[in-house]
Image: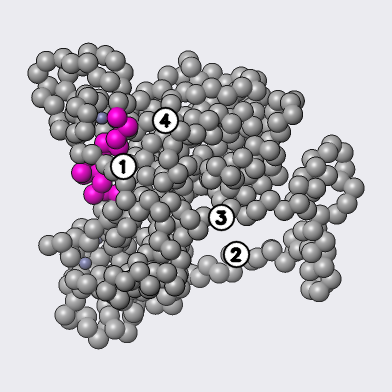
């Protein structure tokens, strides 16, 4: 809703530009990069090479339980991973709820590689279909478009829109998605940037590139990918890139300078993890400006209090309309497709018929959303607070008064005897509860680890508090 005033991608340093041109030349580099120099320095101090320092005896960490089995250790590893996902950051953040994302899909010959099973191509399409559903679930006011890059060209598969069904339909038509040629990252990003040029600065503009090639074949013109990078920084397009091949310098530079993320997928699960990381709305800034407004309200609404800190960002308010649902009786013409269709929604300002919400009205430009969509986007503004763990000794003292089963799914909590057996194995580290109980601070209900994850990941509301 607000312009991201504090979002400042790192400014282009003159030194940086030199580094690009030097390192991008073919042939062996004539000078040592900074990282290499610092690593050598580190090797001098410890007397070992950096790669030796990273080597850890990971199997020493695993402890056997009383009977020599590893089941408890495996369980605790799983619990730790689950807890890591369930824990949400509680720092006040300003998040963009109106997001515009272009997915740039690399369809060069390299996606036929079989290092990801069954092939990179099939895996990407399978993941993208679930990704789209999940993305719209968590960003109901967002819009997504898809750009393909192949044969050194970019083409828009699906223009920016708020309807997941359109995108899913396009992604399931494999005949249109035949991989061929080489990929041009520059053309893909340029097309995505062009597709977002008309959008207001109040929304968050993003691209997610799924890059399978090991290099980019860009046009040999006066406009280079480095100039495009500067333009992306200026247009505030967050560009995240996930590489399936390896670390590519230009990809990392684009991601870092535009405030996006760069990742190299190591296997199928890691690829999924990297993709899913981009689903929650990006944090814009620590809510310093919100704090400013709050303190001003506390001071009786005088402007002086705000003036001391940062001024509140412009565009805090934006116009939205809630449409009327039309009866499914007769067919009428819609403005978005120009087709005769039954049902639909009516724009509250100009009275035109729209097929789906959320969307921008084709006629008057009003943002038309349904109230459940708006309510869902509040998940991230008012998240469920993290549940507390119940320490072992407290659990022992209160054991008689504790509920024997989980308040969410009714599964039995471990008994005193079972807890005693696992002691020492189920470490308290990483926020894992040694008693297997996770307690809501507000309603004092105990939940199991599975429910903890489900509530914070999917449900976004505490069942105990809402009873
Ligand atoms: Zn339509
Ligand atoms: Zn309208
Ligand atoms: Zn449960
Ligand atoms: Zn609760």
User: Looking at the image, which residue is at 37% across and 44% down?
Assistant: 98
Please give the residue where the numbered disc 1 appears in the rendered image. Answer: 140
Estimate how packed mark 1 is, as few (under 14), some (14 to 19) or many (20 or more) residues with alpha carbons within 10 Å: many
2 shown above or below 393: above
Query: What's the distance in space between the residues labelled 1 and 4, CA to CA?
Result: 14 Å
Q: Quadrant of residue 323?
A: top left
Nearer to us: label 4 or label 3: 3
Question: In this image, 62 relative to 349: left or right?
Answer: right
Please give the residue where the numbered disc 3 appears in the rendered image. Answer: 8
Q: Is residue 372 magenta?
A: yes
Is any part of residue 88 visible from this angle? yes
Judge by depth and name the residue closer to the eye, 39 or 197: 197
| Figure disc tally | 4
Looking at mark 3, is its residue's CB closer than 8 Å to ligand 2?
no
Query: What's the distance in space between the residues labelled 2 and 3, CA to CA?
Result: 40 Å
Judge by depth and name the residue closer to the eye, 316 or 439: 316
Q: Which residues are magenta?
A: 364-377
User: Looking at the image, which residue is at 31% across and 60% down?
Assistant: 383
Q: Quadrant of the C terminus?
A: bottom left
Query: What's the distance in space between the residues labelled 4 and 3, CA to CA?
Result: 25 Å
Q: Secondary structure at mark 1?
A: loop
Q: Earlier in the sequence, mark 4 or mark 3?
A: 3
């Amino acid at each position: 809703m607000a312009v991201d005033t504090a979002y400042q991608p790192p400014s282009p340093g003159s030194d940086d530009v030199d580094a690009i041109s030097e390192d991008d030349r073919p042939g062996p580099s004539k000078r040592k990069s900074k990282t290499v120099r610092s690593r050598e320095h580190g090797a001098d101090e410890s007397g070992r090479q950096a790669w030796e320092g990273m080597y850890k005896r990971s199997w020493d960490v695993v402890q056997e339980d009383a009977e020599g089995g590893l089941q408890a250790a495996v369980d605790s590893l799983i619990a730790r991973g689950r807890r890591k996902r369930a824990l949400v950051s509680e720092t006040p953040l300003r998040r963009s709820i109106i997001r515009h994302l272009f997915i740039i899909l690399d369809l060069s010959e390299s996606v036929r590689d079989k290092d990801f099973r069954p092939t990179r191509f099939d895996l990407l399409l399978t993941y993208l279909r679930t990704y789209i559903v999940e993305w719209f679930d968590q960003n109901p006011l967002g819009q997504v478009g898809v750009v393909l890059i192949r044969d050194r060209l970019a083409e828009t598969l699906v223009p920016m829109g708020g309807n997941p069904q359109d995108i899913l339909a396009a992604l399931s038509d494999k005949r249109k998605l035949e991989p061929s040629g080489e990929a041009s990252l520059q053309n893909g990003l340029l097309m995505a940037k062009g597709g977002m040029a008309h959008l207001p600065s109040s929304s968050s503009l993003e691209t997610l590139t799924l890059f399978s090639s090991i290099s980019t074949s860009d046009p040999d013109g006066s406009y280079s990918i480095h100039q495009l990078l500067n333009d992306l920084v200026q247009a505030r397009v967050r560009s995240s890139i996930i590489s399936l091949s390896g670390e590519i310098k230009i990809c990392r530079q684009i991601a870092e300078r535009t405030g996006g993320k760069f990742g190299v997928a190591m296997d199928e699960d890691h690829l999924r993890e990297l993709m899913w990381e981009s689903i929650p709305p990006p944090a814009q800034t620590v809510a310093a400006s919100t704090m400013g407004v709050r303190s001003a309200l506390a001071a009786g609404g005088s402007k002086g209090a705000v003036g001391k800190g940062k001024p509140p960002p412009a565009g805090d308010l934006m116009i939205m309309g809630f449409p009327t649902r039309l009866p499914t009786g007769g067919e009428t013409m819609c403005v978005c497709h120009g087709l005769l269709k039954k049902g639909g929604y009516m724009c509250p300002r100009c009275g035109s018929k729209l097929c789906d919400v959320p969307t921008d009205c084709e006629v008057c430009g009003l943002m038309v959303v349904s109230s459940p969509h708006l309510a869902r986007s509040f998940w991230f503004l008012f998240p469920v607070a993290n549940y507390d763990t119940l320490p072992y000794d407290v659990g022992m003292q209160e054991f008689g008064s504790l509920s024997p089963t989980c308040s969410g799914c009714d599964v039995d909590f471990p008994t005193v005897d079972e807890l005693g057996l696992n002691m020492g194995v189920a470490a308290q580290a990483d926020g894992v509860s040694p008693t297997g109980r996770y307690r809501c601070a507000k309603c004092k209900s105990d939940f199991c680890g599975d429910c903890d994850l489900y509530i914070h990941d999917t449900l976004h509301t505490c069942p105990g508090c809402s009873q």
